Amino acid sequence: MPHDVNLIATIAVGFVLASIFGYLADRLRLPALVGYLVAGIFVGPFTPGFVADTGMAGQLAEIGVILLMFGVGLHFSASDLLAVRGIAIAGAVGQILLATLMGMALTHFWGWSVGHGIVFGLCISVASTVVLLKALEERNLLQSTMGRVAVGWLIVEDLAMVLALVLLPAFATVLGGHADTGHGDAQQGPVAIVLLLTLAKVGGFVLMAALIGPRVVPWVLIKVARTGSRELFTLSVLALAMGIAFGSAAAFGVSFALGAFFAGVIMGESQLSHRASTNSLPLQDAFSVLFFVSIGMLFEPTVLVERPLEVLGVVVVIVVGKPIAAFLIVLALRYPLRLALGVSASLAQIGEFSFILAGLGATYGLMTTEGQSLILAGAILSITLNPLAFSAADAIDRRLRARFPVWAVNFGKRHERVLAVELERIRGEAEKREHEQARKITEFVETFPLFSAIDKEDQEELLLLFVPLSAAPGDRIIRVGEKGDAMYFLVSGTVDVHVKGTAFSLEAGAFFGEMALLTGAPRVADVTAVDFCNFLVLYQRDFRLFMSRHPEVRAAVQAMAEERLAMNRAAATAAEHGDERLDQGAAATDR
């Protein structure tokens, strides 16, 4: 080929193999994530055939990390987390500690250092949000009490791993690793000072994100949404995600992952968060696939043959040790048996954060290639076995209920009732907000049937274009001869319209001012508020933009404008004829 196509080859082959193996995994009733990892193994340096550019794949994986963490932040719900905090925070922290100790005990038998053991234990202590959500959706459990507790639990785990990603560079040398030789700005000095500087930078970033982000990001999204360009809106969402992630890393020294997470959290507060999530999802999915493919490239299949006992030990800790720890913690917190078993099954796997943390550990000399291969092997096998964990949880639940029916039914019932009431309250508030938005759209369409033909998403977009305006009795809204710069939709109240000596009234549901926007001519009428009025105003630029995208609405407005123009002409002609008759009558009287 005439030029370097490593990037194209890496993306093309990665996508092709990921789609093939992802489909095969789905047919085998396995998560597609398993197929993506296997695709990475096939294009990695440890298998024959095509070998992808590992450097290119690493950078693509970094983009995948940014978009993954952006998605986590975008769906982060503080209210849901607060509702399940009694079980999620204590449970997640306790389970991470116990799982990390299990990992350290395992690596101690292998002769690894304490630092390597801590990083390895942290890697196998956190479950995959992607795998969990997929499993809950397949079982229709996402909105159940168990599902929401499991999601809250994983949010706490994700936050703990974000903290670990921030602190690991500061503690690398203490744990027996080294500074990142690839970055000249790596911090040196006593651990306490380095830790304080790191936390100060993170605190500064969080403070800036909390104070400035909610004011700037929603404003930018609304401004872009009002352009009506969907591709520009999607581009702006990605620009904010990538820009905040890169900017935070450059200015504050925090990880791309943390910056992207807070970008998602900030954007999640916007009323356009759902649309932002929907529009960015395809790219998020695509680069997430490349992330898992690049992780698979690091896996050395020979580890299954050369170190089968080590692989078995890792899988046992993930699939058996972690669930048992979570099960005992939930019971110790006095929550029901079924909830404890469901959460345990949800945590019987590891995923994306394990890979991110393992990669960072390798950068600082705290994770060997062998350790990464063991983590990858544990991830692939635990994700493959995860459906069996849910089946096993159901079987154990049935047996315990049959053996100890009174205890199984009554244990933790009070805590479950309190939790269910709180979750129902939050769900009711969310439904109320959605209902309120739907009510606004319904009332808007009922008031102005002109817009009933456009779909719901465009109706929501149209509401963003409108600027609310109110007027008191006697206020002049439009004057004859003015340049037309807006169209007015009357939500409530009554206005008087005076056109060339004729007058008529308009009430709620009417609109006016469109004629000057369509023709470019000056205003031909005076419009005055009769009582207190509320308007929705569509200014000229937004009017032209929306009408160009919805020709059926423009045709209806054009027809109404032509009808009014004909009425005005008829009224003017009648007035002229009336004046002539008056003049003739006066002349006859004079005679």
Image (cartoon, rainbow, N blue to C red):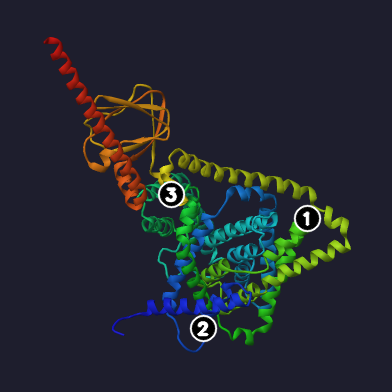
Q: Tell me the residue at 38%/77% (across/down).
A: 8
Secondary structure found at label 2: helix
Q: Amino acid at mark 1?
A: Pro
Q: Which residue is mark 3?
A: 453
Badge 3: few (under 14), some or many (20 or more) residues near its Cα, within 10 Å?
A: few
Quadrant (top left/top right/bottom left/bottom right) for the N terminus? bottom left
The image position of residue 530, as x and y in percent, is 38, 23
Instruction: Return the residue nearer the eye: 167 or 306.
Output: 306
Q: Which residue is mark 2?
A: 42
Q: CA distance from mark 1 to mark 2?
A: 44 Å
Q: Amino acid at mark 3?
A: Ala
> Which of marks 2 and 3 precedes in the sequence?
2
Instruction: Return the residue nearer the eye: 123 or 187.
Output: 123
Q: Relative to 577, is 297 above or below?
A: below
The image position of residue 382, as x and y in percent, is 65, 73
Q: Which residue is mark 1?
A: 336
